Amino acid sequence: MSGLIKALKKNEALVEEMDAFLSEKKGFRLWWLGQSGYLLQWGGKRVLIDPYLSESLTKKYAETEKPHIRMGELVLKPELLKKISVVTSSHNHTDHLDAETLIPVLKNNPGIQFIVPEANREFVANRVQCAIDFPIGMNDGVSVTLKGFTFTGIPAKHNELARDENGNCKFMGYVIQFGKYAIYHSGDTLWFQGMVNLLKPFNVDVALLPINGDKPERKVAGNLNASEAIKLAEAINAKVVIPCHYDMFSFNTANVSDFVAEAERANQGYKVLRGGECFYRYE
């Protein structure tokens, strides 16, 4: 385990940093927790986005044809997360809906609210051992405001734009609006027709996009690659794009230097974060 990519900050030191800025009056902060997980902090409130903070997939696939060999350090033990107002899951894959992460988070944060695709309600309730009516179900075009954050559902193509028998999206992204800001977390997605037109009206400040690409030989659903992530950020006029979904599992990753090269070639604003590193805006 000594060869793991080191987090910038982790566990108690990371929580201490988060707490130190909790009472900030200006701007917002966003910490990368690994894979597609982030903690958003604004106005004294916290949104936990698609956290995967365990070794559950490494254990599950240890003796299979696609072992999930961890590349980066575990940034944060889930039981350390407190004062969370809202937690999200974009879809049912374990790196976005992890029982070992979410059960302690739900337990340790009284009053927390949980956003999921409506199509996944029953699956979610079974996995995280919560009441069936506890999650707040989302679909594309649906918006809900919680604790000052407005979440709007955006379809995600992973690898299909899948819907249940009631027409509800199984794979989603969310635009999160708060104050004068808008963040787009795509979940796991490929580019699809109409995507840009859905997103442009939000005037996205920060786009959180996967870059691990779509390679059938991996035998898992794919995502945008580095070039596609930059092209999408450009097309929706995102001020900054932050890459994710890499440096977690060795069989399903990407070289972030390719993303940097694409961003600089396109003159697109970007920020590459290390695990446990903070992105912030004051203006």
Image: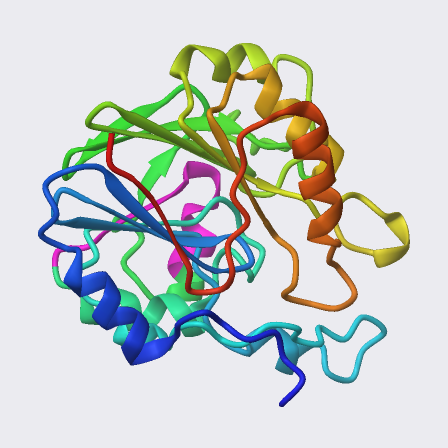
Which image quarter: residue 248?
bottom right
- Name the residue rendered at 43%, 49% in the picture: 89
Which segment is the magenta one?
A: 111-125
In-image side of 63 versus 10 (left or right): right
Residue 258: percent from left, percent from top = 76, 45
Which of 207/136 is in front? Answer: 207
Give x and y (percent) for residue 145.
21, 30
Assess whether residue 120 is covered by the magenta stretch.
yes
Is 22 located above or below residue 106 in the figure?
A: above
Instruction: Judge whether 191 appears above or below 193 on screen.
Output: below
81 w.r.t. 138: above or below:
below
> Where residue 176 sits: x, y (%)?
34, 32
Seen at 80% across and 70% down, the residue is 66
Assign the N terminus to one quadrant of the image.
Answer: bottom right
User: Is 48 placed left or right of 67 in the picture?
Assistant: left
**Residue that appears at 77% across and 54% down:** 220
Furthest residue in direction right, as rendered: 217
Quarter of the view holding residue 61: bottom right
Closer to the camera in the image, 186 or 3 = 3
Q: How is colour applied across the structure in the image? A: rainbow
